[in-house]
Amino acid sequence: MFSDSLEILDGVRLNFNEESLFLLNMTLAFVMFGVALELKTDRFKKVFTNPKSGIIGVAAQFLILPILTLALVLIINPSPSIALGMILVAACPGGNISNFMTSLAKGNTELSVSLTAVADFSALIMTPLNFAFWGGIYASIYSKGSGLIIPIEINPLEMFKTMFILLGIPLTIGMLFSYKFPKITSKIVKPIKIASIVIFGSYVVGALALNWEHFLEYVHLVFLIVLIHNAMALTTGFSLAKLFKLRQNNIRTITIETGIQNSGLALVLIFNPNLFNGNGGMAFIAALWGIWHILSGLGIAAIWSRKPLK
């Protein structure tokens, strides 16, 4: 019954024109440029000079979370668009606000920034690869079980092209700008970070307003799924770090890095007309993730901020 209700979202297309998509692309590119201004080569070195925490953090994001997401999808058996939306979010790199949350939680901020740097560049390959691989497995299982073909095409090459434009170019330009103009960078990095958060937040609010009727009509169908999925992501990071007996500040860091996903990137991919063309189920998953993971992440960070490190 619940799955039947979710299938309604497979055919929903949200109000999003070419101008809106272009603005979203530019907004995300600006955000990634701001992130790159703080990325130095030593950030990448620190992941390899402290390999245990770095490897566990990357593995939690790009290996364990996608595997567990596929398992969750097979257990709850949602409609195809919801399932692929969950797999896409899990395939994305960590969200950039995780650095602030880690600092608030008394985690290892250096590790958080280093993982962000590695994740953002790794996502150029790992996001299309993970989505194509795990999404392909889901599509095969779904088709065998129902006898139906999933009405969503998985195109990793087109996804890679989009990822390169949205992540590769602004990250490279930002790092080169920071290297060539360190004094200017030190003055503009904080205003750009604040501006990027405000601009992206305003954009999300505007997009939500344009689709408010759709939101009110369908939000109840996916909210519980997003809540469970996000809780699983946070638990994945925490459990893996705990299992390998990392220091407490690193456990907090990897928990947050795994539970905060770049759902803005997922939305850009979903609204790409050559990929998913604004599929309603996928868009609702990514949009609600963008709202809920901020609330859950800040909640956990606030609790940990009151607890001293052992």
Image: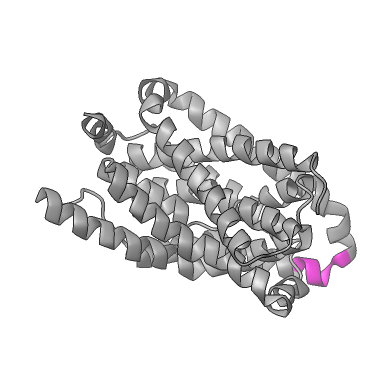
Q: Is residue 29 magenta?
A: no
Residue 290, placed above or below residue 40: above
For the view shown, which residue lies furthest in the left direction? 147
Name the dominant secondary structure of the magenta segment.
Answer: helix
Can residue 100 be spotted in the picture? yes
Residue sitting nearer the eye, 2 or 193:
2
Residue 44: x and y, percent?
70, 73
Residue 299, placed above or below residue 272: above
Residue 154, placed above or below residue 273: below
Say left or right for 103 vs 90: right
Q: Which residues are magenta?
A: 177-182
Q: Residue at x 76, y 54 (%)?
A: 107
Say left or right for 292 vs 198: left
Q: Residue at x 72, y 38 (%)?
A: 303
Q: How is the image coloured?
A: one colour
Residue 140: x and y, percent?
20, 60
Quarter holding the N terminus is top left
Residue sitting nearer the eye, 59 or 16:
59
Q: How many marks?
A: 0
Residue 87, placed above or below residue 119: above
Can residue 26 be spotted in the picture? no
* Residue 310 lies in quadrant: bottom right
Q: Is residue 181 magenta?
A: yes
Residue 219: x and y, percent?
41, 27
Q: Residue at x 74, y 37 (%)?
A: 302
Q: Residue at x 51, y 43 (%)?
A: 231
Residue 240: x and y, percent?
56, 61
Say left or right for 277 vs 95: left
